[in-house]
Image (spheres, rainbow, N blue to C red):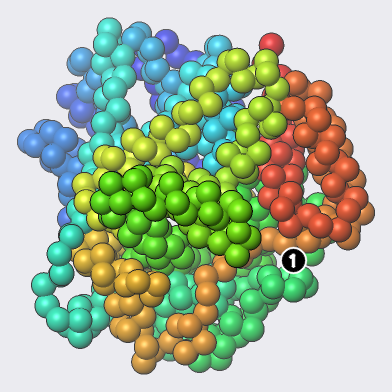
Amino acid sequence: MTLLHGWLGQAPRAWPETTRGTALPIGTYSAADLTLTLTGRPRWAGQSLGVQQIAERLAHAFRSRGEAALADIQGRFAFALTRPQTQELLLATDRFGIEPVYLCASTTSIAYSSRLAQLRSVPGKAEIDLQALFNYVYFHCIPAPRTIFTGIQKLPAGFVLRWRPGRGAEMARYWTPQFAEDEAPGNDEELQQQLRELLSRAVERCRPGQGPTGAYLSGGLDSSTVVANLAGLGTEPVPTFSIGFDAEGYDELAYARIVSDRFRTRPHELYVTPRDVLDSLPRLAAGYDQPFGNASAIPAYHCARLAHEHGVNFLLAGDGGDEIFGGNFRYAKQGLFERYQHLPGWLRGGLIEPVALPLAARVPALNKLGNYIKQARIPLPARLQAYNQVERLGVGALFSGEFLDTIDRHEPTALQQTEYAAAPARHYVNRLLALDGKFTLADNDLPKVVGTAALAGVEVAFPMLDDELVAFAYRLSPRQKVAGMALRPLFRAAMKDILPQQTLSKAKHGFGLPFGVWLGTDVDLQAMADASLSALARRGWFNADLLARLRDELHRSHLAYWGELVWVLVMLEQWLQQQTVAKTP
């Protein structure tokens, strides 16, 4: 496939061949003063032009307006702009980082690529970054700009990188979400009508010019909304693809079938099994540029492969709706804690906490009250990590002392605090949406879907992240996104006469993998996990006692608590083995 890649200054060793996924369109413009390469599926000032046309317009806009031209390019894209006379370079990725850009830079040279693997040929850039490894265990992915390798960075979503010889590289945001804190103009009925129109246009814009377009269908609110709008654009049944699990509490095919029946889709279903996990895990580990610990990558991959096997190579996904319209339960839950934060300090510190906390410690019936106060007095965003296993177990229980001596154990929380504080908003809901735009979408969910689709030979688009739709969502007031414990009230009201009632009332789930459940019963999974943890123990990064305990837990029946951590560690070891990466001395 065609990749965005190149260098200025000292050239790296030969670029390795990469053959992953389907080729995205690419456009180029070259003149004496400026060379530009653009890839992806961008739009220009709201217009759906060809990528070559947009490359030419972007080049001319940079001549006249400089980086202000970035305001006119939208959609999924990445580009490199070089000024040959001064050897200056500009790199940019789209507002949600769907199209990745990796780079390694010094004051004398810079190399960049859409694939991190290509940059490992640059001398001295293939050693494991232990801080990134720590961040991976904390987040289950590696947030940009770090990557798993020292000296190689990933351009964060909505960022531009400037490089000049002698001065090196600097990154800066070119886009920030514009949130409203007050009620959006118009009454709710008018806003609901606007939303329906925007959803229809977003889905239509995402369809390719030719070939069948299918959709992931989990039966949740967003995938169902995408299917509803896609079905309304044509006369042929929409091919939909759904995943099920033979595990209590995980199988949601019934909801997908309700939506499929409502919109008369052409449904395709697959039950993922423990054997599917074992068979596809090495391929996933080898296909990802860095360790990736989101277990739902397994069902996402099989869903995309199911589409490819049925001749559908372009899928629409519902990712992003919760993170722009306020659909995650933690938004409502945090509102309960924020009410405590708004009490006067003298009341919290002088009366409630001195009385209630000791009382709750002595009276079991008041335990929930004590836990509420303990969590509520932790400010956002640190409070979000109350159930993070790194925080609950403690870094000393997870990692070896030698490893901890080399890293900053506070970097993950500092990254979140920086992003939360930088959000251009006062209300906690809007700040959480900004936080999730980076850590949930750009660093985790979007790489999951894009990466697994590419491995299956499928291209994916995200209508919920259409720029016009995102701008509308951000203009809604916090109340129109989260009202008490009600999530996405305006969105649900807009879809009440379109989607089935079961869809509107169902709790969020998605393609969660019952890995912990299967570990307790499947001996082959247990053997694979045992071997992976044993190999990981020999690398010296983790507390040997913890890994021994986890190996012991594999042969018991209660793995709901440990399953997630086991998966994250197994995927790390599998990635290291597939990439033939040696332990850092």
Give the side of residue 117 with respect to residue 556, left or right. Answer: left
Q: What residue type is labelled 1?
A: Val
Name the image quarter holding residue 569.
top right
Residue at 63%, 34% (x, y): give it.
Answer: 394
Q: Where is residue 294 in the image (x, y as percent from the top left)?
A: 61, 50
Q: Position of residue 473 (x, y in %)?
A: 26, 65
Give the side of residue 428 with respect to residue 134, left or right. Answer: left
Quarter of the image with the C terminus in it: top right
Q: Where is residue 273 in the image (x, y as percent from the top left)?
A: 79, 64
Q: Report whether residue 107 is seen.
A: yes
Give the side of residue 375 with respect to residue 254, left or right. Answer: left
Tell me the crowding category of disc 1: few under 14, some 14 to 19, or many 20 or more residues within 10 angstroms, Cα based: some
Residue at 40%, 39% (x, y): give it.
Answer: 416
Q: Name the residue under label 1.
A: 272
Spot the residue most to the left.
64
Q: Report whether residue 62 is seen.
A: no
Name the image quarter holding residue 481.
bottom left
378 is higher (above) or lower (below) than 457: above
Q: Nearer the viewer, residue 153 or 437?
A: 437
Secondary-structure class at tag 1: strand
95 is higher (above) or lower (below) than 305: above
Residue at 70%, 22% (x, y): give it.
Answer: 400
Residue at 42%, 49% (x, y): give it.
Answer: 353
376 is higher (above) or lower (below) than 495: above
